[in-house]
Amino acid sequence: MKGMGNMMKQAQKLQARIAKMQEELADKTIETTSGGGMVKVSANGKQQIVSIQIEKEVVDPEDVEMLEDLVMAAVNDALAKSQEMVASEMSKITGGLSIPGLT
């Protein structure tokens, strides 16, 4: 039974480290662009979009679809990079161990 108690303590420590990491990741951001830098999107470690910047040169009322595509591409890339950032930080804590539901 002593081994089980020790394992529970280890799990609690791991849980605390993960909670701290998640708090820290909320403050970390990544930025990505599309359209040669015409659309910039920033996302945080909670996979939330925190800013979108669109250069006025790319805003063409006659071609709204292009702008929509550029925004969608930048947002999807920002979210993917944010997920990569979280996975990288998580692997530092878990030692590369894949724990379902944590990444």
Image: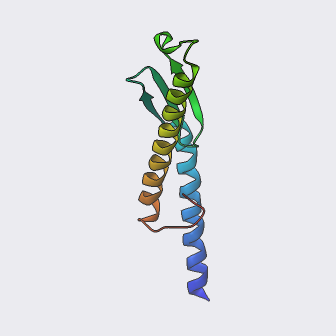
Q: Is residue 22 left or right of residue 88?
A: right
- Name the foreground residue: 67 vs 10: 67
- Image coordinates for residue 39, horizontal then vertical, percent: 47, 23
Give the residue furthest to the left: 36
Q: In percent of the image, x 54 and y 33: which residue is there?
A: 72
Q: In percent of the image, x 56 and y 85: which residue is there?
A: 3
- Image coordinates for residue 84, horizontal then vertical, percent: 45, 49
- Name the foreground residue: 23 vs 73: 73
Q: Is residue 10 above or below residue 44?
A: below
Q: Is residue 95 above or below residue 49?
A: below
Q: In percent of the image, x 43 and y 32: which residue is there?
A: 32
Give the residue furthest to the front: 62
Q: Is residue 92 left or right of residue 83?
A: left
Disc tally is 0
Where the N terminus falls, by quadrant? Answer: bottom right
- Name the foreground residue: 48 vs 55: 55
- Image coordinates for residue 6, horizontal then vertical, percent: 56, 78
Where the C terminus falls, by quadrant? Answer: bottom right
- Asked which colour scheme the image uses, the reply is rainbow
Quadrant for residue 10, please give it. Answer: bottom right
Q: In percent of the image, x 45 and y 68: which residue is there?
A: 97
